[in-house]
Image (cartoon, rainbow, N blue to C red):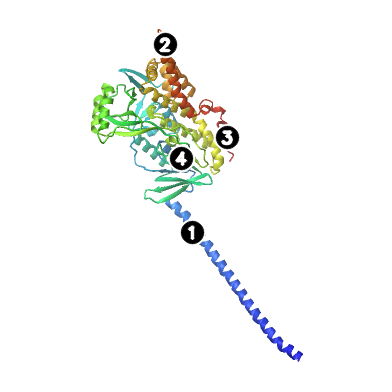
Amino acid sequence: MELVSGFSALPVKMADQTLLASILALLFGFVVLYRLVSKKNGETESESLAVTTSTTIISRSKNGADVDADIIIVGAGVAGAALAHTLGKDGRRVHVIERDLKEPDRIVGELLQPGGYLKLIELGLEDCVEEIDAQKVFGYALFKDGKATRLSYPLEKFHSDVSGRSFHNGRFIQRMREKAASLPSVQLKQGTVTSLLEENGTIRGVQYKNKSGEELKAYAPLTVVCDGCFSNLRRSLCTSKVDVPSCFVGLVLEDCQLPYANHGHVILADPSPILFYPISSTEIRCLVDVPGQKVPAISSGEMAKYLKTTVAPQVPSELLDAFISAIERGNIRTMPNRSMPAAPHPTPGALLMGDAFNMRHPLTGGGMTVALSDIVVLRNLLKPLHDLNDAHTLCKYLESFYTLRKPVASTINTLAGALYKVFSASPDQARNEMRRACFDYLSLGGVFSNGPISLLSGLNPRPLSLVCHFFAVAIFGVGRLLLPFPSPKRMWIGARLISSASEIIFPIIKAEGVRQMFFPATVPAYYRAPPAE
């Protein structure tokens, strides 16, 4: 029985095992099939991703995000256009994005000092002042209380073509844009840059909108921001302490001749200076400085009234009729005068230049000279480099730019700020004595005028020479007060004059940086060598 029972149970067990094996085989088959299907799907997804990525890159390229550029330049004003041509000429692939490629219409940036013209020659851009009716400028004429003195640029040692140039700012910029765009390595596009693209503290490129409003991105190892005095990108790249000491009111005078041909004219008026200089063979630019951030309203007629009643009586008689006619034509323009010391935050992948980086009062017309000088410095630093992709190493190396630019920049910046304060009228008797002393000191001629005018022109960028002349003016003023017989009152005014001079110049020097300005060779970055390739 047991045997029979055992044999009868065996088929049942074997049947159960067969069924179990079948189920396991079926499950195994499903697993294998699932894996095969998953693998196939995975390959399809990978292929799809590859196609999508490839399509995106192609799309970017088609849409103008130049991922292969060496350098992106934001802005194509004087600094941006000149830099684009300079770097493009050196073989760099440059992508320039400018908000508006139409000819600008501005009332400043119209006078290029001789030092700036020499930099223009050095950059191979001197022909940009040709065919725009630019006028040669050989110096300045100063007017005060009915007296006048002429200050000529010390150009004896230079080629006969070297002088200042004055012109319509827009014509000059368009010439430089055309020259930059003529290079095959320079791509000039219209678009508004909305932000810098940052990744782990490094700027990788920019995001911008093109003419049709489409959002695009552009990538490059180095982005140079040159988007002007109203820059919205400089906040993360520098400490932007912008001061607005005054505003310019601009007019264009026609059918008249300047008292001194081919000279800029500065009238030491009350409350602040008035400028005249030629911008074409038939037009003279007039800039009336109005202290503070508010100006009389143009639309209500207050501005015309102010110009006729307060300013016109102080205008030289040779220009008065043309000045009144310009007011009556009604094409009156205003612009705030901004100053901002250079206080960079060295950032891998980005650099600031032009008015976005550093501004000074436009009284001395030094802005373009500083910008062109900065471009020469940057070009010389980048020239030995073939690879710009190591952003941190490049950033460390380019710290030397901020020191090497100082002799020219700090001299022109300090002179602009100091002269504006000296040339403006003041209720303080000591300040007015300083103003009178400055006019009479420059009227002496010889070294007394050649020294200051060579500083103003950018031909002698020596900060120490500037400080020496500035305090020589103050001491000259004190000497006049004390001669022939000093009195306690005159001695007191003399002491206040020296104190006032110190209060004018020392804060400007402090903002520029004493060490970089006077002792640049003691700054470690001054000796920084190019990184090894």
Calculate the distance from the C-alpha at mark 2 to the C-alpha at mark 4.
51 Å
Reading the image, the residue beneath label 1 is 52
Could you say whether the residue bearing mark 3 is in a helix, strand or loop?
A: loop
Dot label at residue 529:
3
Residue type of the residue flagged with mark 3: Ala
| Viewer can see residue 397 | yes
Q: Are marks 3 and 1 in contact (CB under 8 Å)?
A: no
**Of label 2 and label 1, which has the lower sequence position?**
1
Residue type of the residue flagged with mark 4: Arg
Reading the image, the residue beneath label 2 is 488
Q: Nearer the viewer, mark 4 or mark 3?
A: 4
Q: Residue 118, percent across and down? A: 43, 28
**Of label 2 and label 3, which has the lower sequence position?**
2
Calculate the distance from the C-alpha at mark 3 to the C-alpha at mark 1.
43 Å
Q: Relative to residue 302, is residue 427 drawn left or right?
A: right
Could you say whether the residue bearing mark 4 is in a helix, strand or loop?
A: helix
Q: Residue 9, percent across and down? A: 71, 87
Q: Residue 181, percent across and down? A: 41, 42
